[in-house]
Image (cartoon, rainbow, N blue to C red):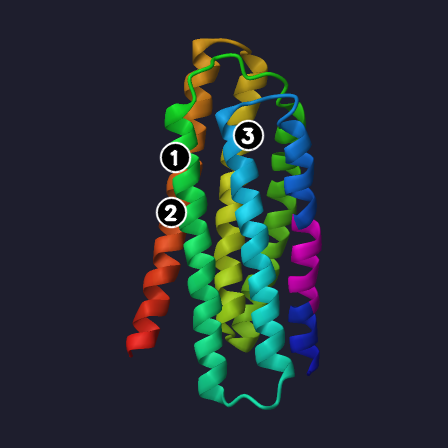
Amino acid sequence: MDKDKKSSYRTLLLSVVLSSYGPIILGYGLTLGHSSTQISDFTRRTAELLALIVALVVYMATNKRDDMDEAQKKALERKGNFFCGIIMCISGLSMLVISFIATDTEKGNVLLAMLIAFFGVVANSIFWRRYTLLFRKQGNAILGVQARLYGAKSAVDVCVTLALAAVLAFPGTKASYWIDCIGSVLVSLYMLRCGIKTITENLWKKNN
């Protein structure tokens, strides 16, 4: 594995390691607060962790094994990216469902979830930039989808941070309820858009 591929592998591995903390901390945070945006964020991060693990496994398989030809590698990459798109869609749909069934205006303590989202903005923006540069160098499809995923994650975390900040600023009010719901819906729609785009692109590649 050359230098650029080793760098990509380490970036993917670091993504998995850092992303694994989010669901654990947010899972604990759900015992303190039950904002629909917070629940949606937990669902999203758990799904994204699974997608990242699949991306890492596929990248390792296509770059470390010598018994695969180029066609087999491309097919495996398509399957990995297709799965990533499916995960994004499932995540988005689950968040939409949670948004519409949530009726309680009392959201509890969402400070921990807001801090996770804020630090997510910083970390995901860095990874977004990193994956974009790696994709430009290598043109690897796995890295391209990860760049899109982290771009979405960055935008979503901004939305989550603002929504949870509003819940903290106006606890137990109708205003915080509607801001929380709108934030959750925006998060879900953005994830759905990215997921559908990833799926359709990989279906097109398969048929051409």
Q: Which badge, 2 or 3, is on the more N-terminal residue?
A: 3
> Residue 192 — which label?
2
Residue 46 on image: x %, y %? 57, 45
**Counting other residues with Cα less than 10 Å from the Cα at mark 1, is it few (<14), some (14-19), or many (20 or more)?**
many
- Quadrant the N terminus occupies: bottom right
Q: CA distance from mark 3 to mark 1?
A: 13 Å
The residue lying at 64 percent from left, 34 percent from top is 27
The residue lying at 61 percent from left, 61 percent from top is 130
The residue lying at 36 percent from left, 49 percent from top is 193
Q: Which residue is mark 1?
A: 96
Residue 113 lies, with reference to residue 124, above or below; the image says above
Segment colored magenta = 10-19
The magenta stretch spans residue 83: no
Q: Which residue is mark 3?
A: 38
Residue 17 on image: x %, y %? 71, 54
Query: CB under 8 Å between callouts 2 and 1?
Result: yes
Element marked by disc 1: helix
Instruction: Tell me which amino acid carries mark 2.
Output: Leu
